[in-house]
Amino acid sequence: MCEKALKMDNKKKILIASSGASSLNGFRLPLIKHWRALGYEVVATACEDSTATAKDLEAIGVKFVPIPVGRASLNPFADVSLVLRMAELMRRERIDVAFLFQQKAVIYGGLAAKFAGIRKTFAMVTGLGYAFTESSGLKYKIVNKVASLLYRFSVKCFDGMIFQNPDDMEFVQKNFLKRSHIPLKRVYGSGVGLDDFSYSSDFDKETFLFIGRLVANKGIREYIDAGKILTAFGKTAEFRILGGLDVNPTAITKAQLDEWEGKHVCRYLGTSRDVRPIIRSSAVFVLPSYYGEGTPRSALEAMAIGRPVIVANTPGCREVVFFEKACQRYDWESGKFVDLPLPVNSREHEGEILMGDNGFLVPAKNAEALAVAMKFYLENPESVLVHGRESRRLAEKYYDVNDVNRQITEFVSLAPESSKASQANFMKI
């Protein structure tokens, strides 16, 4: 009924705003196509320009209007300019609905929508990122205080918020929504195209793959250190890295990356617009991130292709390892895995190594624990296929991009403008 109503209301115009341009055509293209098919006119904007993004969006009839201020900029004058320019864009394009994702777009886009008088504004929290995941340093403390203050203002501008994991929803409710009763919804990440990322059982043996921006809090250092530990114990494996250098305060430098490659610690694959051949050729996906993920898209892609996943037991990441059939905990004293009774709340075991149906959760910032999980697949190669098949099953069950996009569209269209309905009616965890 919702989708039929949207088709009839084909004069509505949506603005979709992101911090990074590549996220529009990299992560949200299926959602934008879905909206176009339902009769929406869509305008896209981001805090940086991109010829590739503009080309991909224009191919499906979407105007891309970048407002390049830098997605990691901390310049307050640039941020004020961003709010004013976004508000002007919304007024000029006569936007009916603003859909915002990624932190800078969420915070400043909400304020811009308020100034522009937009009828409906929705935010999708795709991870809390650097501002809420580091714990020390003067720069972090300043960023955290400023981001917290801005979040408190921006949430008042939203007609609804979407979250990719329950940890983020709980955090925002507790810290920024104490007196607000806007509708909230949890969805299963960004979803993944199950046909595009089809199952494959062919791969290079004894290979691990890290995909992500090369920033320290994505767990890249722990990944490298775990590889060094395994090599020191005589294990033979290739530790692959796919991802670009970044401007984040914790970014890995080109010199550091060159040093790792020069010492044959890892194999750097650069960046790629099509990650499928690289995932298919690798045996196990690894992302020991403590960055503050929504739900890592790269992990969903690896699951769909049929790869075991090893991730940190942190918000967002822990959503990709499931314990529907079994759970085992690693006992450091005996060096063996022991059964845990189901159901298992992974948040209660953040300091332990847990083996689930399709991979491992490991403690954050712990290279030794990560090495234990990786070593399991080197010593039990048959488990790569077993866990990989479970990954595909779980991707089909929970992470189909079509299901996720329908849920987002339904929420955006049904959230009431002024309703006395209980917030609980909109909370789908």
Image (cartoon, helix red, strand yellow):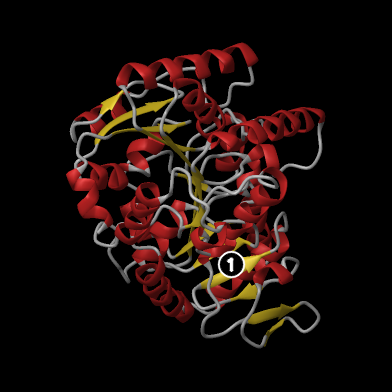
Q: Is residue 250 visible?
A: no
Q: Is residue 13 above or below residue 29?
A: above
- Front residue of 90/28: it is 90
Q: Quadrant of the N terminus?
A: bottom left
Residue 218 x/y as whole percent: 60, 46
Residue 420 x/y as whole percent: 53, 52
Q: Is residue 345 above or below residue 30?
A: below
Q: Is residue 245 above or below residue 396?
A: above
Which residue is found at the position 62% from the left and 51% from the top? 224
Mark 1: few/some/many CA within 10 Å (<14, 14-19, 20+): many
Is 153 positioned to the left or the right of 40 in the image?
A: right
Q: Is residue 308 above or below residue 129?
A: below
Residue 303 quadrant? bottom left
Which residue is found at the position 37% from the left and 75% from the top? 393
Which residue is disc 1 drawn over?
A: 374
Q: Is residue 402 visible?
A: yes
Residue 91 quadrant? top left
Is 146 positioned to the left or the right of 127 in the image?
A: right
Give, as a three-letter code, the residue at label 1.
Met
Q: Number of labelled discs?
A: 1
Which residue is found at the position 59% from the left and 59% from the top? 166
- Front residue of 344/117: it is 117
- Front residue of 350/365: it is 350
Q: Secondary structure at mark 1?
A: helix
Residue 269 x/y as whole percent: 43, 43
Residue 342 x/y as whole percent: 62, 86
